[in-house]
Image: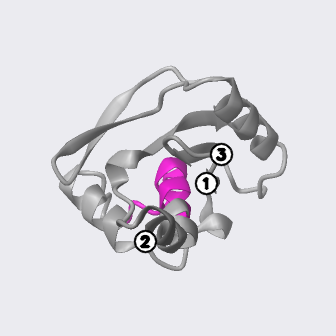
Amino acid sequence: MISTAYYVVAGGVPILVHNSCGPDMGAAARAAAKNVPQDATMTAVANIRGTNITEIGNSGASSRPAFLEPEIEEAAADGGQMFGGDAANCAEMRACNALFANHAADFEETFGRPLQLSEVFSAVIFSIGC
């Protein structure tokens, strides 16, 4: 399971990642880890706090998103997570990116305000094949 924890600064807000966050997300990550592409070495689950909305992210070239959502790209740059201009191989980044790509518009329609990165909890990471 996870052995380290760190914070990413998202628009001035520190966000904890690489942290176990309860059985529901742990179960989701374990289930997701069973169905990953062959080139994935890590899987992560991101959740919008206070909801049941989650997304899975995997490392590896075959799971690379077409682009990073602006909120994720900005936070990655602010938090020093851009490695040679590419943070998109990080399973956590991909899970958070998928939340924004797939749920931000619905969130705004439901709650009457934009989804903020500080409301996303990305944490459970499993090493595949270890």
**Residue 90 included in the magenta stretch of the image:** yes
Q: Position of residue 108 (x, y in %)?
A: 44, 69
The kind of residue on which mark 1 rests is Gly
Q: Quadrant of the C terminus?
A: top right
Dot 2 or dot 3, earlier in sequence: 3
Mark number for residue 57? 1
- Is any part of residue 128 visible from this angle? no
Q: Quadrant of the N terminus?
A: top right
Please name which of the two marks, 2 or 3, marks the residue nearer to the observer: 2
Please name which of the two marks, 1 or 3, marks the residue nearer to the observer: 1
Question: What residue is shown at x 48% (from left), y 27% (from top)?
Answer: 19
Circle 2 Cα neighbour tier, 10 Å, few/some/many (<14 / 14–19 / ≥20): many
Q: Position of residue 8 (x, y in %)?
A: 29, 42
- Is any part of residue 105 visible from this angle? yes
The kind of residue on which mark 2 rests is Leu
Dot 1 or dot 2, earlier in sequence: 1
User: Magenta residues, as a range?
Assistant: 85-98
- Of all residues, the one furthest to the top in this rendering is 3
Question: What residue is shown at x 35% (from left), y 53% (from top)?
Answer: 117
Q: Position of residue 114 (x, y in %)?
A: 36, 66
Asked whether disc 2 touches disc 3, contact meaning CB atoms under 8 Å apart, the reply is: no
- Of all residues, the one furthest to the left in this rendering is 12
**Frontmost residue, 128 versus 107:** 107
Residue topped by disc 2: 68
Dot 1 or dot 3, earlier in sequence: 3
Mark number for residue 41? 3
